[in-house]
Image (cartoon, grey):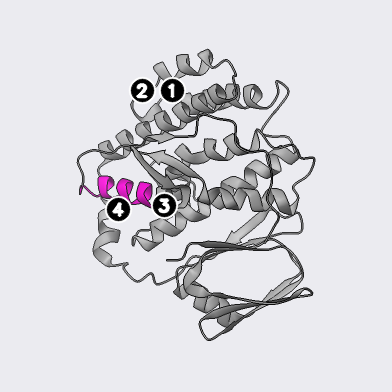
Amino acid sequence: MGWRSVVVSQHAKMSYSSRNMIVQTMDGINQVPIEDIDLLLVSTTQAVITTTLISELVKGQVKIIFTDNASEPVCETVGYYPNNRNVDLIKKQFKWDSKRQQLLWTKIVASKIVNQINVLSIYGVENVDLITELDKLEVDDITNREAVVARKYFPLLFDNKFSRRDFSPVNAALNYGYSILLSNVNREIVSNGYLTYLGIHHHSNDNQFNLGSDLMEPFRPVIDYWLANQNFKELTPDVKFGLVDLLNLEMSFNGKKMLFRNIISEHVHNCLKYLSGEADEIQIEVELKNEVPNNAINGNV
């Protein structure tokens, strides 16, 4: 699996040649070894990609994300035949113990709320209300503390009139960042040989990524953490690239310093082992840097 995130944000033709992705733009021709690529984000509708390249990228377990005219992610590739998928793993997934699912969801929600509290703390925002809600968390979050905290958290982080239902640049950026996060979680689920459809909390018939939607939750505040310090009036290519580049952010996960992309991989692996009964305990402890992130937004690739 690769390590580079490639973002195409202008008119381009992408093709395949000798284990390389060839990108032709008005500025010239670039080639990137497929084995180096972790994520390809086609952040424009003015790009052409060959089916040969798509096939080779999917074989290399590269996640490809396409956006619409509004630059919102609209679809991603999911390989039909991951190298290690087998019937036994799928059978295990269908028989996951309900108690383990409930306990894992409780851990996920607790970790998410703790991270939201920490984000507010980093920005010097009062977070007593969220701490109070965390104390009310029950097994399987039967009282839906996750939603209660979210309604209080976003107005505290951004402004008291902020709503996740608004069509604002901040919401567009949040959705964009969450989509990148979800895609990376989905890729890890598939690469471990499991189905993304079968969630432990999300069970929508319209969501083919129910499990990814579950396992990504502790890391949503990482997106919030970065965006809260950015000053922008629209979702520009620079903002998009900054969100993709968050995958290279270094954080502490379960006591170890790791890149965000590697944290996602380890987290998904740990959760799947726990759900399948291969581990008796599960730990989800994320520690963001206790400082406001650099406000500079990098240029796009």
| Residue with the mark numbered 1 | 143
Indicate whether 274 appears above or below 22. above
Residue drawn at (78%, 44%), measured in percent from left and top? 234
Q: Which residues are magenta?
A: 265-278
Amino acid beneath label 1 = Thr
Tell me if residue 208 can be seen: no
Contact flag, marks 2 and 1 (Cβ < 8 Å)? yes
Q: Is residue 135 magenta?
A: no
Is the residue marked by circle 2 packed among few (<14), some (14-19), or many (20+) residues within 10 Å?
some
Residue appearing at x 31%, y 37% in the figure: 283
Residue type of the residue flagged with mark 4: Phe
Amino acid tagged 3:
Asn
Q: Which mark is residue 281?
A: none
> Which quarter of the picture shows residue 237?
bottom right
Residue placed under numbered mark 3 in the picture = 262
Residue 285 visible somewhere in the drawing: yes
Find disc 2 in the rendering and name its residue: 138
Callout 1 touching callout 3 (CB < 8 Å): no
Cα distance, mark 1 to mark 4? 26 Å
Left or right: where 269 falls relative to 207: left
Disc 2 residue type (three-letter): Glu
Residue designated by label 4: 94
Q: CA distance from mark 1 to mark 3?
A: 32 Å
Between tags 2 and 4, which lies in front? 2
In this rendered view, identify the residue nearer to me: 244 or 61: 244
Is tag 1's residue or tag 3's residue first in the polypeptide sequence?
1
User: Which tag is nearer the camera, tag 1 or tag 3?
Assistant: 3
